[in-house]
Amino acid sequence: MIGLSNRNITAKAREFYTSSGRTKVELVLLKQHASTIDLEAHILLTDQMTCSGLDNDRGRKILSSRIDVALSGIASVKRKAGTSLPFDTYIEFMNIPLTLDGASKCRDIL
């Protein structure tokens, strides 16, 4: 998968780090239906933001806004703000088909 580092995938494969090693993604199964699932991705920046001239609060607001714009218009996906520093957020995927296409959609969004 693009953006994933195989050496950082945990044994249970419920979390992974992006290729930069600075962002942790934890996956949680919220609900399983007959042929779909509801999945939550907790995205956590594990290192300080590196935006010169911005304090952490302003950086969080800008990043949240950009994620909201990127996700707008994508049906069955919504974002919730997190509270951990320096930055975290939750993305919920609702009614994702239990198919390769469903997995690909989640991967592409992440």
Image (spheres, rainbow, N blue to C red):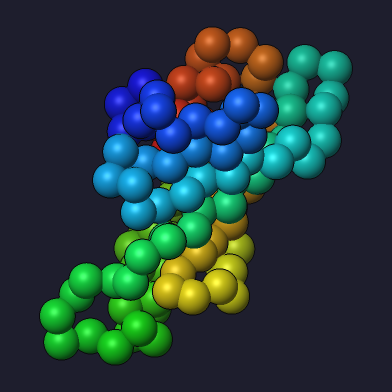
Can the viewer see residue 62 in this picture?
no
42 on left or right of 58:
right
In percent of width and height, residue 102 lies at 56, 20
In percent of width and height, residue 47 lies at 36, 65
In percent of width and height, residue 68 lies at 43, 61
Report which quarter residue 66 is drawn in.
bottom left
What residue occupies the far left of the structure in this picture?
A: 52
In percent of width and height, residue 70 lies at 36, 52
The C terminus: image quadrant: top left
Say how many tags the image has. 0
94, above or below 90, in the image: above
Report which quarter residue 65 is drawn in.
bottom left
Q: Residue at x 46, y 21 (%)?
A: 104
Can the viewer see residue 85 in this picture?
yes
Q: Residue at x 54, y 21 (%)?
A: 103
The N terminus: image quadrant: top left
What residue occupies the far top of the structure in this picture?
A: 100
Q: Residue at x 40, y 24 (%)?
A: 6
Q: Residue at x 29, y 71 (%)?
A: 49
